[in-house]
Amino acid sequence: MDNQSVLNRLKDKFGDQIQNPLEPHDLLTVETSAESIIDVLQFVKSDDLLQFNYLTDITAVHYPNQEKSFAVVYHVHNLYQNIRLRIKVYIDGQNPVIPTATVIWHGANWMERETYDFFGIIFEGHPDLRRILNMDDLGVFPMRKEYPLEDPNRVDKKDFYFGR
Amino acid sequence: MSLPITEITSNKNVFVDNDPQDELITLNLGPTHPATHGVFQNVLQIDGERIVSGVSTIGYIHRAFEKIAEHRPFYQITPLTDRLNYCSSPINNMGWHMTVEKLLRIEIPKRVQYMRVIVMELARIADHIICNGILGVDTGAFSGFLYVMQEREFIYEIFEEICGARLTTNIGRIGGFERDFNEIAFSKIEEFITRFPAVLTEFEELFVRNRIFIERTSGVAAVTPEEALSYSWSGPILRATGVDYDVRVVSPYCSYEEFDFEVPVGTNGDVYDRFLVRNEEMWQSMRIIRQALEKISKEPSGVFHADVPEFYLPPKEQVYTNMEALIYHFKIVMGEWETPQSEVYHAVEGGNGELGFYLIHDGGRTPYRLHFRRPSFINYQMFAPMSSGMLISDAIINMSSLNVIAGELDA
């Protein structure tokens, strides 16, 4: 089983809901939409041929210049045949909502809490969506690009002068 | 960044006290507690000695590595990775270097790969020494821990000989190492693998067939493989449940496919199995180190980095005299080289499981997004659900056997 057959199987089942297949550094990457992500994840986990039984990671990326600013990235892994798959879901920046993957894997619980904590993406149906690493009343979502790394009111450490 | 205080809020309850007759006590285990290895907190609701439910709060040592990494060039991110799993920081360093080399498509010479394997396996031994020793301490057996800690000090001396630092090593550079292993380093490594087996045998005699230890740990916190896979466990605790997933075997990196070693697998995933799996992994790591030393002796000596002048700093003496070296040095430090716009995910087998680096690069001087897939974080989420119904002492042992390193938990 290789990347091409995984892609064919996904395309057979989901057609054009699977978009933009790429293979950066031999890791098959596909895009799908927030409406179909749970079906896709359930299919890749339970299908007899695909057998992606292990959820490696869930994270997000912020692209402020795009219309759909957030990309939620799922990495899954077929432990039987050592094939990895990366699924990206681009969602709207003003109202970032996506269904939760905890219905499929328990391990998605803290991964989604971390993504919510840093990006503000709401995972619908999550049993306990609250901040995990930052303090509860932080008020902002730190990994978004508009949130600065250092305090902009400090006058002694300007990134520019340090060559950053 | 301090926000102005606009309102005083009462301490939020982490969970709702649903016991009107007050038979259950709320116990705050942590964040500073001698039994938790690092700063993380568990608010437990206990009925006598038995835990009814628990809520984990973490983030006490969150240092915003992923945010900082978006503002640092690749070679400045290595010290950040040191501080992830600080008990085995060379593994984190090597994993990061391999991620960047995968992005930049740099080929590493065999000798450098074997040197990396030696360093990573020494770090793995150091991590397992701490975990098993502390597991012994948590059950009350202090002497074993002291004996094996002396060997961990010797590993620190080896790291100090290689890179200058003991704990947060910042070993290696993109493309190889900053200097070759000198003779003292090689002799110390050989001395280590000759004297560690006796110490480890003595440590085993203290615990493996010890009736008190077996009664204390056997059957505690048993986990089925399906549950463990559903919670995305990885590393020795997953292998103790019976799933033989080891990143070094499944997706080999850094020439691990050339080494002959076994992956120890347990049967019922309890604390005793995890102890035995880590113990056996130390023996296998020593086997790997011996094979790596042999393989290094067959390679042409003196090679300690790849030939990539665009990313590997030239020797300082040449920078002052040679024009090309000066230009390379300037361009590397200023970040003027073209780097591909791509995204790469690379995983290594850390001391606790699959340590993954997800790097999205946009061609600039710093990464666009860097995410660490941290095994301690993902392994730990099962702790609170798992501990309901356990005795407190069993939960403490369960926590030590999960080997949660706070630096990797929070990052």
Image: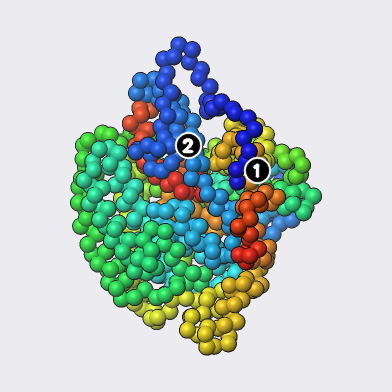
The image quarter in which residue A5 lies: bottom right
Instruction: Give the CA distance from mark 1 to mark 2.
Output: 25 Å
In the rendered image of this protein, does residue B124 appear above or below residue B307?
A: above
x 32%, y 71%: residue = B185
Label 1 marks a residue whose chain is A
Q: Position of residue B65 (x, y in %)?
A: 55, 53
Query: Of all residues shown, which one is farthest toward the right?
Result: A67
SS category of the residue bearing label 1: loop
Residue that numbered label 1 is attached to: A141
Q: Which mark is residue B263?
A: none
Residue A87 visible from this viewpoint: no
Question: Can marks 1 and 2 be said to lie on one chain?
Answer: no
Of residue B264 and residue A93, the one placed in the foreground of this image is A93
Select label 1 or label 2 by which is in front.
Answer: 1
Colour mapping used in the image:
rainbow
The image quarter in which residue A140 lies: top right
Q: Position of residue B28 (x, y in %)?
A: 42, 29
Q: Is residue B283 left or right of residue A121?
A: left
Quadrant (top left, top right, bottom left, bottom right) of the C terminus of chain A: bottom right
x 22%, y 62%: residue = B195
Residue A91 visible from this viewpoint: yes
Q: Which mark is residue B382?
A: 2
